Amino acid sequence: MKFPDVLIPPPLKKPQKPGTNGTNGTNGGTPVDRAKEAPADLVGWLDERTGATSFLTGMLYRKVPKGTNWFYTLGSATLFAFVVQAVTGVFLAMYYDPSPTQAYGSVTHLTNDVFLGEFVRGMHKWGASVMIILIYLHMARTFVFGAYKYPRELNWVIGVVLLILTMVMGFTGYLLPFDQRSFWATVVGVNINGTGPFIGPYLSDFLRAGADFNAVTLSRFYAIHMLLIPGLLIALIGAHLYLVVKLGTTAPPWMHPKRNRAIAKEERV
Amino acid sequence: MRARRASTHLSLNLADAADKTNGQAGDGSQPKPHPPGYFEGESMSRRRALTVAGQAVGGIAGAIIVLPAVGFALAPIFEKPDELWESVGPPSRFTDKTYKPVVFTIVEGIGEAGKTTAFVRQGSAKYNENPNSYVAISTRCAHLGCPVNYVAAAQSFVCPCHGGVYDFQGKVIGGPPVRPLDRFQTRVEKGEVQIGPRYSVTSQLQPVRARDPGEFTGGVWNYIYPPRPDTAPAP
């Protein structure tokens, strides 16, 4: 379990232990044997310096309660939907131009002319709906199974914030194609924000960067959609997963211990 | 519990180790200072002073980055707009019997998205208006901002989104809108009717500073939905 010896420059080599007589610190064997050990050596080298193996083992091989079933995969499915959105979003950003005069043209170009562009855009567009649906199913599972109860309340709260952030993603992303539908839907959405008392008018000014839809509104929505909210989402998903690993998952509510006569008697007391 | 007590001991030991002048523990001639870790005449231990100083420097450095960024994002809320006036034709083009649609720019530099439509007519004696003035009704629905259309046969404005209906003066006669249609300031200059900044009206058609759609006007509503500094003052 060592870094391949040939790759280490001589000055950095570990000095020989006194009394050993190996030529270059290896235990001998043919070069083929040593080459076969190289991957294990590389993993060992990394693990010795990061402790990653114990972390990953603890996370991936943690114990799950009896009765764990397919409903418990909805959270992972949501995470996968998020990853799909992130990856397709990065590639869409390579062709998209967030300026009011160019945005619509760049989206039609990306959809109609770019190789597989329609497919990638379709993944991003429909994936957004899939992600929202999965979040609600995941939330329903948590609620119905009572998995939000002590000590997992904080994870429920983080999950609600994640739901809201995902909806902000949907709201800001809807404007980006910049066709008639997305423009007017955003006008209506911003005005709904504005109906909040006292701070509502200023909130819609913040979203539009002014009293009217203007030259920087689109780039503002774009920055919120691809920089601000994804950063928050990734950070909070990390916290969400940390708490899942730390607290473990719950058993389904029907997996309670069998009540025999002795337990019933104990409960009466 | 055990771990917690151990850590308390540890910090006390460290504090004692930092105590150079009064640490005469052992010979019993002088009492140990309380709390430990303080030099003679000091009201704060060095450890504490350095912690506070470090946190203060970190806080200032953070504020230097965060405050300008937040101000940068919020600045447009407080920016005063330029007043745009655009000519829409000679006075002879408009009558007091019906509205004529005019298209003009309210936001510069974004092409078609910066244009809007208004319906313009001459002031009518029937509504106690000066016949030399012009009324420009915004097509932005007072419900949520969809574009309304003037239906000449019914002498009313109709919104396609949620069924808002306004009468000839722009007052609500049906549907969800919360106030009459907005208007634009008008003036006649060099023989041309010009259209200027937007303003909103109360249900009695009193002008107020422009509000966004969905926000009530008049009375206490003017405070619940406060005027915004990036709009033009009411005429």
Image (cartoon, rainbow, N blue to C red):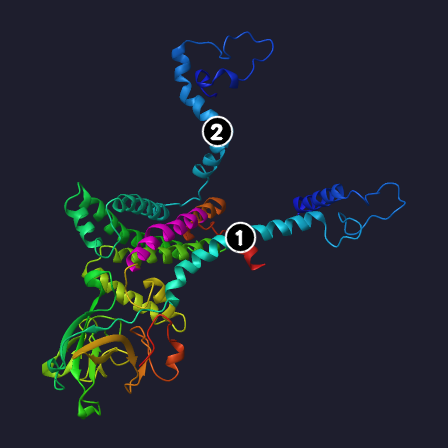
Q: Magenta segment range?
A: A217-239
User: Closer to the camera, B232 or A267?
Assistant: B232
- Number of other residues with Cα within 10 Å of mark 2, as a class: few under 14, some 14 to 19, many 20 or more: some
Residue at image point 44% right, 18% down: A7
Kind of residue at badge 1: Ile
**Residue A164: image x %, image y %?**
37, 58
Tell me, yes or no, if residue A198 can be seen here.
yes
Mark pair 1, 2: CA separation = 48 Å
Q: Circle 2 sits on which residue? A: A47
Callout count: 2
Q: Would you say the magenta stretch is mainly helix, strand or loop?
A: helix
Chain holding disc 2: A
| Tag nearer the camera, 1 or 2 | 2
Residue sitting farthest toward the front: B190
**Residue A149: image x %, image y %?**
47, 56
For numbered disc 2, what is the local secondary structure?
Answer: helix
Q: Which mark is residue A263?
A: 1
**Residue A136: image x %, image y %?**
33, 56
**Residue A212: image x %, image y %?**
29, 67
The quarter of the image holding the C terminus of chain A is: bottom right
For numbered disc 1, what is the local secondary structure?
Answer: helix
Left or right placement of residue B129 versus residue A202 in this view? left
User: Closer to the camera, A263 or B123?
Assistant: B123
Kind of residue at badge 2: Asp
Left or right placement of residue A26 versus residue A137 in this view? right
